Every structure is written in structure tokens, then in C-alpha cells.
Amino acid sequence: MFLNSFKWALVFNLGWLGWLMSPIALAQTPPEQAELLGIKLTEADMKSVRAHLNNLGGFKQDRATADHHNMDKFFAYSNLRDSYYVQFRYDANGKVVSAKRLLRRSGNHFNNDYRDVETQQVARQLIETYGQPNQVIRKSLNGLPSYASFVWQDDEVRITVDRVGSDRYAPIFIEYEISTDPYVAKQENEDDAENANPLNNAL
């Protein structure tokens, strides 16, 4: 019994090693250069995110986040059809601190049919850009079948492919987390001061 388990683990790990070391896995774009929908996340802010998605078209902002200063959620209706939504979080100065893309459970974008998408399929696409992941983690919840979660990370950005709630049958998400303080103090500038003063806007 022990030998069978050992053989299975050995075959599994060798299989992952062979796949990760294939030529497609040797791309070396660092996570700090990560982009989502053409937005370079380490340089983006609320204003540039909203303007970019407006120019792309095919996204509708969640009304609940329209007046938020720390989060935007955009539903995909005629663009990025393999996803339910994309979500951005910001610090007090409007800089992006994280971005998340929630994938639909099934669709022909990954499979050419309508079977459920697997984390390995999503990871393969990211490997084309970022190379092999830093971590491959086997997860299971309440005795359900296990699945693989993937992490790419450098000093600036952490990219995670996982399932909502670590549930084998839940939707898959891709999350980008920027290594910065999300609670940084607001930096006032002259334009902000003028706009904040009601006397400057009164006629």
C-alpha cells in the first residue's frame, strides 16, 4: 500500500516536472510586469483602469462600486466572455493594490467544448508568459477530490490561480496582488485641495 502511494506520488511529481520544464514553460516575463486586459498593474490607478475599460468596451461597471474609492467591479458582457467579472482594489491614492478575474465554470475558450475548466488549463496559459510557477499546491476541502493551485511570485507581484473557497467544484480565479501597503495615507495635492474647498467651486 505504501509502495503504491509512493509510486503514484513519484509519477505525479515527475509528470509535473516534465511539463513545467518543457520549452513553453521557460518564458521569463517576471510577475512584476503582469498585465490584465492590457493594464500594467504596478503602474495603474483607478482613473486609468476606468478609462481603459471604457475604451475597450464590452464591460459594465457594477453600480455598487461606481462611487467607491477602493474597489471597481466590471461584468463582462461582450468582451472577455470566458469570465464573469474583473475586480480591482485601490489604495487611498487610487493606485491598484490587487486585481482579480473570475472565470466561468465552462466554455469553449479553454476546451473547445463545454466541459468544466481545470486550473491546469488556466496555468498553462500563464506559463506561456511567466514561466514555471514558484509553487504548485494540492488542495482539498471536506474530503472532496483534490486539485492543483498555482503561484507565481517575485518582490513586486504575486499571481495566484485557485478556486473560490478552495472548493474543487467552485469557479476558478486569477488574482494579482501588488506588494504595497493597501492602507497607505492619502497624499494631498493642490488640485485635490482646490476641489475639496467649496468656496473655490462656488459661483
Image (cartoon, rainbow, N blue to C red):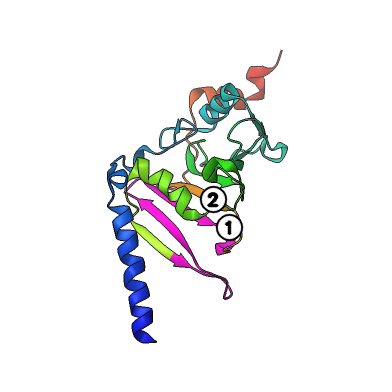
Tell me, for residue 29, which label it has, or none: none
The residue wearing badge 1 is 164
Dividing the picture into quadrants, the one containing residue 196 is top right
In this view of the protein, which residue sits in the foreground, 23 or 103? 23
Residue 182 visible in the picture = no
Q: Which residues are magenta?
A: 138-166
Element at label 1: helix
Label 2, label 1: how far apart the Cα atoms are: 7 Å
In this view of the protein, which residue sits in the foreground, 59 or 179? 59
- Residue 142 lies in the magenta stretch: yes
The residue wearing badge 2 is 173
Identify the amino acid type marked 2. Phe
Identify the amino acid type marked 1. Val
The location of residue 104, given as percent across then percent down, is 61, 47
Element at label 2: strand
The location of residue 83, given as percent across then percent down, is 60, 42
Query: What is the number of callouts on the image?
Result: 2
Dividing the picture into quadrants, the one containing residue 101 is top right
Residues at marks 2 and 1 touching, judged by CB atoms closer than 8 Å: yes
Rendered view: 136 above or below 189:
below
In this view of the protein, which residue sits in the foreground, 59 or 155? 59
Residue drawn 60% across and 44% down?
107
Q: Residue furthest front?
A: 113
